[in-house]
Amino acid sequence: MTKVRAVAHIHSEWSDDASWPLERLAAAFQRRGRSVLLMCEHSRTFTEAKLAEYVEACARASTDDVLVVPGLEYNDADNVVHIPVWGEVPFLGRTPDIPDVLAHAREADGIAVFAHPWRRQAWRRFDTTWAKDLTAVEIWNRKYDGWSPNREAVAYARRLGLPPFVALDFHGPRQFFPLAMELTLSGPPSRATVEDALRTGRFEALAFSRSALRLASGVGGVALAAAESARAVAARAVRAAMRR
């Protein structure tokens, strides 16, 4: 068994709202001690042909030290519910129905994660009967949850009986943060062993190299939540000042 640290939900220039090339991402995360990138490009600009090109580009960007794993993030028609998908899953369309995404991912033995469930209250739209086709739930999305885990998302994942996932939702340097998914691989790092570890639940969500769940409560969790609240207030003040 081999343990590796992966970063999840990473967007590159292959997405319509990000600009970093795959090779730059691989080098940047290698410097931060990560050896697997779980890429997550928006499906809304993809085609079947573009997906094939993208899979090849991820393979070329991989090195002996960093594995770049291709993935797509599907969203519903009005951009509320988002589902990152990894594995040998055929292209499902630019904005397919979420139940179809989940069903097809499961049929293809793929991996499907419910992304940032509290963004735009996506969890309210998510039918709990769909949970049978999910692999995990993001309890901490750096882009939307900031510096602390989302306690409501932690409780929600528990209600669904699904393991926690932490993700950067990386679009640029502001999303660098010490979150990682520690994967236990059955062999050397490869797309097949990484996807198998995700599929079979051999992973743990980490923050600052410790269980992310430990920061959802207790003194450390309270401190992080307070820091995130202060950061959010300051960010809103800056944005308001810039609009004047």
Image: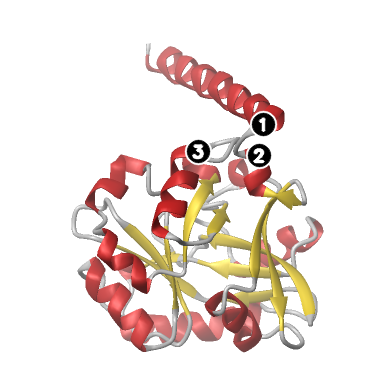
Question: Position of 26 compared to 110: left or right?
Answer: right
Q: Is residue 180 visible?
A: yes
Q: Mark 3 points at which residue?
A: 151
Q: In this view, does 185 lie to the left or right of 18?
A: right
Real-space CA distance between mark 2 and mark 1, rounded to the nearest whole angstrom = 7 Å
Q: Name the residue under label 2.
A: 215
Q: Is residue 136 left or right of residue 132?
A: right
* Element under disc 3: helix
Vertical relation: 156 (above or below) 226: below
Does 65 appear above or below 208? below
Q: At 63% across and 83% down in the image, what residue appears?
A: 60
In the rendered image, the quadrant that contains the C terminus is: top left
Give the amino acid type for the residue marked by disc 2 in the picture. Answer: Leu
Helix, strand or loop at disc 2? helix
Q: Position of residue 20 (x, y in %)?
A: 57, 59
Depth check: 227 or 200 in front? 200
In the image, 7 versus 184, the foreground residue is 184
Amino acid type, callout 1: Gly
What's the CA distance linking mark 1 and mark 3? 12 Å
Q: Which of marks 3 and 2 is nearer the N terminus?
A: 3
- Please give the name of the residue rendered at 77% of the width and 51% of the height, measured from the top-left corner: 209
Is disc 1 in contact with disc 3, using a CB cutoff of under 8 Å?
A: no
Residue 217 screen position, x and y as percent: 62, 35
Residue 176 visible in the displayed image? no
* Contact? badges 2 and 1 (CB < 8 Å): yes
Count residues near mark 3 (Cα–Cα under 10 Å), then give few for <14, some for 14-19, many for 20+.
some
For residue 190, above or below residue 12: below
> Amino acid type of disc 3?
Arg
Residue 93: percent from left, percent from top: 25, 76
Write down the residue under mark 1: 218
